[in-house]
């Protein structure tokens, strides 16, 4: 075991003298309480280590012991349904006490195991070795690097996560065993067979996202927004309603009171798929701003490692990171204590590469076992004063393909989701158009483009209206403003607290988009025929369309067809009225 001794310490960073061999990213135990840490720099006779606990009480001369392993976490069936800190240590307990520094995850749960291999079978990495029963049935996969011939398999029964259930002999004569859990280095991406191209969207149930700015399954999205714009509420809505099999929610450096609300609300949410608790397919990793800053930096890597573990089981995983700005601030603080040359706004020069490494671990892949799995990352960003030109937002923007910009003015107007339709974008629209066309909306790309063009025109016309007055605008321009208002109310506004409209299926989204675009067509034709905008505004169907999300829930999609007929009838009556006037 390698050993070093502290000579200098500042906050979570220490320097230690040594003549032994250490490795970068090696896990270490520091001081009399064996505080967990990680080697981040190596010199000729010195190592630099960051500590994941409060360093109060450490002094020069205290020992730093190397473990010989990279910083790792244990991955197993005891993760779902629980809350952990940034090092995957449980935060739940009957006494509510803080974790001791040397605490580790010691699961007392036992899980049912049914083998899928037999003695004499060849075992390879990613192979299904058995089924594990629990709150959610999982698969025991042979970890990466496993290869050999099965020599013993446990019979069907219940086992602890650290009990062997299979033994195998390697080609070099050594032996190995499988348990229900295994360790994996958090900074090392888990291997897969190959990446798969973008093919289907991850449905979020939010119209403004799915219809205008869809995210691909296995994609990467940024959710930037200033204080009070609804980042956390939107991420909770996405966690509940998106079509992912497993949710990994990481609260990275958020304020304790805000994180407490998440920890209270998320476990109580009902899973719309099963009617049970959403927590049964959720892993929460909580690291608040009053926890050690270095552990905040590690929590992001812990979360993505957990997500990859479930991806390798052939599941589709959504990772919600709230927020990567706090993670970047941890990098800045540690970099400052190391004396590194600061970059823009004091962030380290390697900020962009660290962000890229994190988002690169998203993707839709063919696993080592041949199944299809995916990790979709949605990272919230908290730019100071809502300034999207600050370094974290700008560097994140280079890494993602979907950008959902939250707007403070829309939030202050109680317009939710407060996603700004002209500052947001999705680079996967063309690749996902085929999916929407197969779902029964062949005109989806053109309809989406038309809606965005109308919203762009609205900004220009509202600027003019503030100067000369709305009533001074030509009738055609007044009608455009009327139609843009309808698009905002009918299509883009959606309350997460509405019993009817908190989720919108692709079928209902298609029906609403079709009828709204048809209204635009009929309104344009009426304007060409000389119908005044106020007559269009007075139509009963327009008022119904403004609240269509609340009026026509998932069980009443067919009713939108009857509303379509009413709309056609009312516009036809307008045309006859105009003809009689002539």
Image (spheres, rainbow, N blue to C red):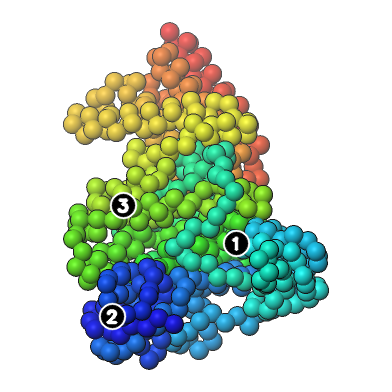
Q: Where residue 530 sits in the image (x, y, percent)?
A: 39, 14
Q: Where residue 562 sits in the image (x, y, percent)?
A: 63, 32
**Which residue, given by chain and number where applicable, does mark 2 sit on?**
16
Question: In front: 476, or 265?
Answer: 265
Q: Is residue 415 visible?
A: no
Sooner in the amino-acid sequence: mark 1 or mark 2: 2
Question: In front: 581, or 276?
Answer: 276
Where is 233 relative to 421, above or below? below
Measured Cα–Cα span from mark 1 to mark 2 = 33 Å
Dots 3, 2 in contact, CB < 8 A: no
**Which residue, given by chain and number where applicable, does mark 1 sit on?**
145
Q: Residue at x 23, y 79 (%)?
A: 10
Q: Where residue 22 sits in the image (x, y, percent)?
A: 38, 74
Measured Cα–Cα span from mark 3 to mark 2 = 29 Å
Q: Where residue 148 sits in the image (x, y, percent)?
A: 70, 63
Give neighbour class at mark 1: few <14, some 14-19, many 20+ (Cα, 10 Å).
Answer: few
Give neighbour class at mark 3: few <14, some 14-19, many 20+ (Cα, 10 Å).
Answer: some
Where is 408 relative to 303, above or below? above
Q: Residue at x 51, y 48 (%)?
A: 363
**Which residue, given by chain and number where applicable, does mark 3 sit on?**
352
Q: Is residue 496 left or right of residue 281?
A: left
Q: Is residue 543 left or right of residue 199?
A: left
Sooner in the amino-acid sequence: mark 3 or mark 1: 1
Measured Cα–Cα span from mark 3 to mark 1 = 31 Å
């Amino acid at each position: 075991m390698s050993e070093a001794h502290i000579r200098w310490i500042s906050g979570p960073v220490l320097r230690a003298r040594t003549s032994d061999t250490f490795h970068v990213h090696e896990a270490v135990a520091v001081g009399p309480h064996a505080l967990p840490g990680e080697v981040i720099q190596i010199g000729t006779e010195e190592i630099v280590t960051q500590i994941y606990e409060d360093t109060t009480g450490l002094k020069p001369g205290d020992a730093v012991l190397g473990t010989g392993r990279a910083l790792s976490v244990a991955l197993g069936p005891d993760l779902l349904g629980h809350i952990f800190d940034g090092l995957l240590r449980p935060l739940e307990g009957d006494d509510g006490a803080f974790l001791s520094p040397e605490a580790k995850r010691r699961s007392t749960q036992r899980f049912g195991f049914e083998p899928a291999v037999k003695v004499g079978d060849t075992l390879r990495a990613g192979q299904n070795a058995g089924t594990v029963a629990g709150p959610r049935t999982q698969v025991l996969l042979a970890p990466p690097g496993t290869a050999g011939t099965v020599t013993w398999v446990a019979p069907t029964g219940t086992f602890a996560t650290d009990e062997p259930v299979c033994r195998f002999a390697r080609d070099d004569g050594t032996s190995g065993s499988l348990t229900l859990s295994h360790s994996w280095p958090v900074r090392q991406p888990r291997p897969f067979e190959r990446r798969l191209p973008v093919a289907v969207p991850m449905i979020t149930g939010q119209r403004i996202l799915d219809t205008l700015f869809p995210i691909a399954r296995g994609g990467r999205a940024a959710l930037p927004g200033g204080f009070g714009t609804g980042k956390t509420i939107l991420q909770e809505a996405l966690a509940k309603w998106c079509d992912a099999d497993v949710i990994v929610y990481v609260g990275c450096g958020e304020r304790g009171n805000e994180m407490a609300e998440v920890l209270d609300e998320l476990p109580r949410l009902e899973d719309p798929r099963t009617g049970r608790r959403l927590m049964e397919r959720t892993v929460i990793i909580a690291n608040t701003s009053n926890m050690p800053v270095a552990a905040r930096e590690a929590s992001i890597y812990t979360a993505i490692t957990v997500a990859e573990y479930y991806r390798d089981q052939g599941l589709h995983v959504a990772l919600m990171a709230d927020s990567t700005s706090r993670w970047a601030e941890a990098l800045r603080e540690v970099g400052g204590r190391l004396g590194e040359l600061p970059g823009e706004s004091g962030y380290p020069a390697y900020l962009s590469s660290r962000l890229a490494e994190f988002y690169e671990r998203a993707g839709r892949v063919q696993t080592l076992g041949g199944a299809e799995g995916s990790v979709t990352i949605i990272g919230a960003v908290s730019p100071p004063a809502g300034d999207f030109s600050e370094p974290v937002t700008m560097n994140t923007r280079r890494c993602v393909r979907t950008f959902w910009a939250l707007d403070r003015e829309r939030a202050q107007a109680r317009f939710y989701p407060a996603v700004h339709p002209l500052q947001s974008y999705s680079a996967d629209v063309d690749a996902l158009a085929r999916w929407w066309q197969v779902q029964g909306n062949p005109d989806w790309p053109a309809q989406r483009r038309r809606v965005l063009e109308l919203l762009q025109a609205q900004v220009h016309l509202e600027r003019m209206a503030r100067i000369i007055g709305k009533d001074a605008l030509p009738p055609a321009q007044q009608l455009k403003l009327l139609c843009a208002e309808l698009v905002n109310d009918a299509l883009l506004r959606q309350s997460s607290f509405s019993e009817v409209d908190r989720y919108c299926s692709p079928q209902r989204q298609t029906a609403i988009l079709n009828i709204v675009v048809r209204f635009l067509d009929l309104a344009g034709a009426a304007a060409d025929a000389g119908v005044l905008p106020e007559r269009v505004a007075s139509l009963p169907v327009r008022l119904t369309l403004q609240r269509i999300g609340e009026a026509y829930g998932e069980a009443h999609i067919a009713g939108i067809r009857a509303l379509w007929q009413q709309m056609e009838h009312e516009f036809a009556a307008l045309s006859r009225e105009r003809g009689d006037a002539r």
